[in-house]
Image (cartoon, rainbow, N blue to C red):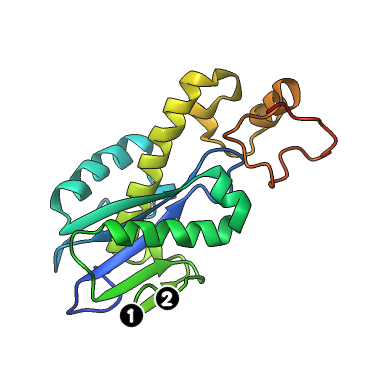
Amino acid sequence: MLISQVKSGVLEAGCDEAGRGCLAGPVYAAAVILPFNYTNKWLDDSKKISEKVRSKLRLEIESVAVSWAVGICSPREIEKINILHASILAMHKALDLLKIEPGHIAVDGNKFKPYKAIKHQTVVKGDGKYLNIAAASILAKTHRDECMQALHKEFPVYDWNKNKGYPTKAHRDAIREYGSTDHHRKTFRLLPEQLVLFKK
């Protein structure tokens, strides 16, 4: 069973991102403030949960959360400031959108930049340890997957409905055959050989 939050007794926002390792699409981040003493035996790291259960948990989280929000950084922003900074910026954007300012921030991973004057703590693999970070991982993942499903309808050859922009063989084969799109991150290593001229 996951612990509710890192620092007890304060309104704490859990933060996590989705899509850092993708070749295409935006990076998403979520910030979630759960009620004190909230419990949910199904809530865990989004990568450990099936798509069906993630969808149910998303509805639950969005319904019961004291406040929640999602922040997005586009492929162009990622190219401009790099994926680490874009992931942190997306978290800051999510925090900006919360209806209630948290008293503490718990962040999955080991990198973060101070947000306002609010104290924060990074937690490696925090999405498998704390409910509020796990909740953020669920929202970031499901909202991003929804985005990639929509983009798939416009660009079906890349199989984004299945790979969500990650560097699968099918995705890279499609890049090799059809070139890249405006949704691809051009500063990423799209193909191992890096000798292909890409269409804009």
Q: Dividing the picture into quarters, in which one does residue 55 lie? A: top left
What quarter of the picture does the C terminus occupy? top right
Front residue of 41 and 23: 23
Residue located at (46% from left, 32% from top): 148
Check if mark 1's residue and mark 2's residue have beta carbons within 8 Å.
yes
- Image quadrant occupied by the N terminus: bottom left
Looking at the image, residue 19 sits to the left or right of residue 189; the answer is left
Question: As shown in the figure, which amino acid type bears the numbered disc 2?
Answer: Pro
**Does residue 73 lie above or below 181 as drawn?**
below
The x, y position of residue 137, in whole percent, is: 37, 53
Q: Residues within 10 Å of mark 2 (few under 14, many from 20)?
A: few
Task: Provide the secondary structure element on which disc 2 rests.
Answer: loop
- Res. 94 in view: yes
Give above or below for 77 relative to 194: below
- Image x and y of residue 196, in percent: 82, 31
Rate crowding at label 1 as few (under 14), some (14 to 19) or many (20 or more) other CA atoms within 10 Å. Answer: few
Instruction: Answer whether residue 40 is visible to the viewer in this image.
Output: no
Q: Amino acid at mark 1?
A: Ala
Please state if 120 lies on the left or on the right of 104 as rendered. right
Residue at 65% from the left image edge and 27% from the top image edge: 170
Q: Residue at x 50, y 44 (%)?
A: 74
135 shown above or below 35: above
Could you tell me which residue is drawn at 48 percent across and 67 percent down?
109
Q: Position of residue 58 (x, y in %)?
A: 26, 44
> Is disc 1 placed on a helix, strand or loop?
loop
Q: Which residue is mark 1?
A: 117
Q: Give the numbered dot on residue 108.
A: none
Q: Position of residue 127 (x, y in %)?
A: 39, 61
Q: Quadrant of residue 32?
A: bottom left
For mark 2, what is the residue?
114
Q: CA distance from mark 1 to mark 2?
A: 7 Å
In this rendering, would 64 be left or right of 183?
A: left
